[in-house]
Amino acid sequence: MAHPANSGPMDDDERRRELDELGFEPSSAIVPAAGVASRALFFVLAIMSFLACITVGAVAVVATAASDWRTDIAGEVTVQVRPVEGLDMAAAIHEATTLISATPGVRAVRALSEAELRGLLEPWLGSGVDLDELPVPRLIVVEIDRHAPPDIAALRARLMSAVPTSSLDDHELWQGRLAVMANTLIVSGIGILALVLCATVLSVIFATRGAMASNRDIVEVLHLVGAKESFIAREFERHFLRLGLKGGLAGGAMAVAAFGAVRWITAQFAATPAGDQFDALFGAVSVGWTTFAGVVLTVLLVAVLTALTSRITVFRFLRVFD
């Protein structure tokens, strides 16, 4: 060798030049770029990255949809006027709408017509519903100013005084349930993401230890002739960083394709009865730029996590030579 072991320690550049003179690159000598283990780890990283990207994208979609739902719900309140015997419904609705319109913080008031009420009841009671024969409450939709909302408690009290059969629903119960559901889904998604990343770390640990064991003689010789632990660890880190990027990009590409398919399917069902029913139940679920940004960050996270895990594993493995 150009630098014998007793000639003093070599720096990384000198050691790399010496290995190049022998006809191979250090990283390919220590960690073979192609092999059954590398191919298997590539597919494992691709699958884990795909699952992580899907989880991040789903959490982003749920968070965005929940925010939109809360905004829509918080922007309206509903007033019901229940029919009772002897009540002039038209006069009661007129009195309620007049009182609500004069309240500061109210942007618009609209009483649903009988045709609109029949449309709401048609999926359950069929067409041709006679509202005079059913004790169906009349609905008044109130749009409020989100920046300067009215005093809901005072408005409710004035309505009860003016129209005793009326009731005001500010959807607070629904907002609470929606917040609980959204937070549960987000926490569940974070938990799944943590499990996927833990499985990724374990896979990299086993792959790194396997590579170290299969190349033990080379690693031991390099260590005995004066190669620093950081030099050996850096070669493993570079190898697994490249592998992590390749696997992460493959999984991210599959996730982007899956989200693109979701957007395409959603567009196909837009303005259809099935699409309208889905929007009515779950709201408008869309895959936006935040989802794709989450995919990119997840790919980078998988690559960095792979490299750091391999580096730490190499340092732990090299302790046996000390």
Image (cartoon, rainbow, N blue to C red):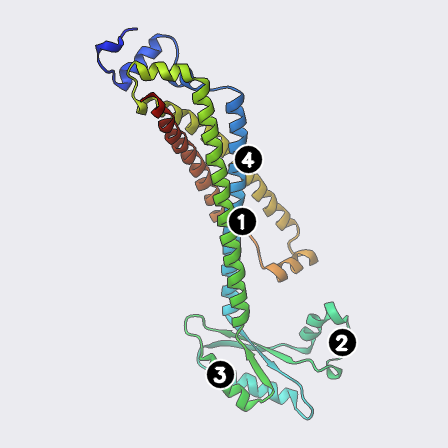
Q: Amino acid at mark 2?
A: Val
Secondary element under disc 3, as helix, strand or loop, is: helix
- How far is the residue under mark 3 from the one under mark 4? 56 Å
- Quadrant of the image containing the N terminus: top left
- How far is the residue under mark 2 from the one under mark 3? 32 Å
Indicate which disc residue 47 carries: 4
Residue 202 location in percent, x, y?
47, 34
At horizontal 76% and vertical 79% (from top left) the residue drawn is: 130
- Whether residue 285 is visible, yes or no, is yes
Are the residues at dot 3 and dot 4 in contact (C-beta closer than 8 Å)?
A: no
Secondary element under disc 1, as helix, strand or loop, is: helix
Counting residues from the start of the chain, the first of labels 1 and 3 encountered is: 1
- How far is the residue under mark 2 from the one under mark 4? 54 Å
- Whether residue 292 is visible, yes or no, is no
Which residue carries the number 1 mark?
A: 58
Q: Amino acid at mark 4?
A: Ile
- How far is the residue under mark 4 from the one under mark 1? 16 Å
Residue 8 location in percent, x, y?
21, 13
Residue 162 location in percent, x, y?
54, 90
Which residue carries the number 2 mark?
A: 129
